[in-house]
Amino acid sequence: MNNAFTPSEPEIKRAQDVVLAFRDAQAKGRSVVALGSKMIDPPVVQRALRTIELAIAAGRLATDWDAPSVALSAAKGLCAGKEDSSASPQNDKRTEA
């Protein structure tokens, strides 16, 4: 993979922080969380998940990093507007491009 398209170490760390903060927020029944002075909502988490996927594909991050696959799947589902039992009753029908 071309290094120009590979996430840098700071980008990978930030993506991990975003996903972990979001996972913790989900465990508390929230769909938005603050990380430092920034609000983290599902679109931000989706970008972070993509960064993590790229880092794994490039061999810069282990597939078994600190976020269990269940949490990643839940975050992807929420980011895609899919419901789970802990989500709000509102059904968002957005689709991914």
Image (cartoon, rainbow, N blue to C red):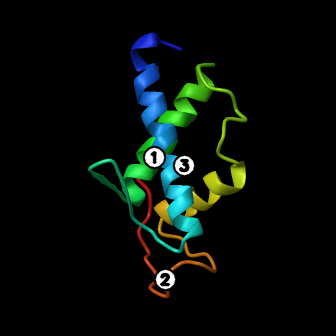
Q: Quadrant of residue 56?
A: top right
Q: Which amino acid type corresponds to the residue marked 1 in the rendered image? A: Val
Q: Are marks 3 and 1 in contact (CB under 8 Å)?
A: yes
Provide the residue designation for mark 1: 18
Secondary-structure class at tag 3? helix
Residue at 45 percent of width and 11 percent of height? 3
Label 1 SS: helix
Write down the residue under mark 3: 20
Q: Are marks 2 and 1 in contact (CB under 8 Å)?
A: no
**Marks 2, 1: nearer the viewer:** 1
Label 2's element?
loop
Tell me which residue sits at (39%, 14%) in the image. 4
Image position of 9 with respect to 44: above or below: above
Proximity of marks 3 and 2: CB atoms separated by less than 8 Å: no
In this rendering, the answer to whether 12 lies above or below 1 is below
Q: Is 87 positioned to the left or the right of 35 in the image?
A: right
Q: Nearer the viewer, residue 89 or 14?
A: 14
